[in-house]
Image (spheres, rainbow, N blue to C red):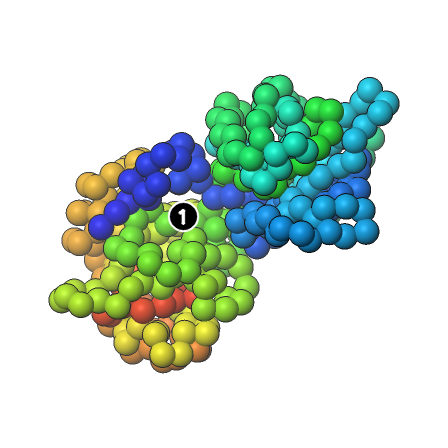
Amino acid sequence: MPSIESLNPDLPLFARSGINLASAGLGAKALEATNEFFAPLERMLADSEPVFIEGKFDDNGKWMDGWESQRRRDGGHDWAVIKLAAAGRVLGFDVDTRHFTGNYAPACRIEATVLGADESPDESTRWVEILPYKPLGPSAHHFFRCDSYERWTHLRLHIYPDGGVARLRVYGVPELDEADAKGEIDFASALNGGRVLALSDAHYGDYRRILAPGRGLDMGDGWETRRRREPGYDWMIIALGARGTIDKALIDTAHFKGNYPDAVSMHAADMQNFGDGLTDALITDSMFWKELLPRQPLGPDAEHRFREELADLGPVTHVRLNIHPDGGVSRLRLFGRAA
């Protein structure tokens, strides 16, 4: 019954508990770069792990899975601008140079800015340094904590003087502004700050994608547990992006045809005074939360919508999703109004 805090203990806590705001799968965009001669900027935002394909070349040279600029001869350095998937507070970075051995970027620096939804960076944009100059090495993860507590929408990654970065992960917490929080919102959406805090099992797929936008692309794009060979059921605890009343729910089993859960239920609680700790106490406490959705049957490869079946619990901050006895769920949506 692991909390996310206990998963992958070799990673910094911000990389285990934060949402990757630079995820292309969540909507992050590669806007511009000074140079993309060997590999395009958009590859640096891919959700997949970087790969190296022996003997694969394109018109400009060796094919690399990431962003790679050509060798500079003018004394300057390269940089790139990305739009984050959601405005939010940045907790830390992973500047990943895997598979870049003799062509990695030797150093980096990161700046940030905040712009409106319809605005793009230009020459008048004011950039603020949120990660000072840091050395990088070949073919490795480089984790750096961010000490900025402000809300950002765009980042500018500087590399010195040139070279390649396989992946840039920007771990943080999306933050809704007042305009976004008005009307009906999806409390579970990762883009609104929804986060998985704990789960019983995550043997297959990527459990974080259960809170991603859109429908699943395939059976690996969602949460799937192993087959249970003991009594009980599987579950997941989610911190909502805002405190509010849930009046609609959607459980999507897209692509799960022979391995969908037989049934689903949910419990919820108002834990606004609990804080943001990922502790075993939260898991234990969830066993006594009030029932939000009584047990309901599920079917294969379909969206299941619930409204009248939901109990009126008032404002809540956390939800426990239970699948009986096991199986796969592609997406979870929890709609309502912020308290």
Q: Residue furthest left?
A: 231
Indicate the amino acid at tag 1.
Arg
Can residue 266 be seen here? The reply is: no
Residue 326 appears left or right of 223: left
Q: Depth check: 107 or 104 in front?
A: 104
- The image position of residue 176, as x and y in percent, is 52, 44
Q: Is residue 297 above or below residue 146?
A: below
Where 284 falls versus 109 (above or below)? below
Please determine whether, in this image, residue 174 is positioned above or below residue 232: above
What residue sits 29% from the left and 40% below the top?
Answer: 6
Q: Is residue 260 left or right of residue 18?
A: left
Q: Residue at x 76, y 43 (%)?
A: 38
Percent position (x, y) of residue 208? 43, 53
The number of numbered badges drawn on the structure is 1
Using the image as rendered, state which of residue 52 and residue 134 is in the foreground.
52
Q: Residues within 10 Å of mark 1 (few under 14, many from 20)?
A: many
The reply to whether residue 21 is visible in this rendering is: yes
In this rendering, position of residue 243 left or right of residue 53:
left
Q: Which residue is mark 1?
A: 195
Q: Position of residue 200 (x, y in %)?
A: 25, 55
Instruction: Please tell me which residue is depicted at 50% across the width and 69% down the height of the picture.
Output: 218
Q: Nearer the viewer, residue 75 or 132?
A: 75
Q: Quadrant of residue 271?
A: top left
User: What residue is at 45 percent from the left and 68 percent from the top?
Assistant: 219
Quadrant position of residue 256: bottom left
Quick one: SS at disc 1?
strand
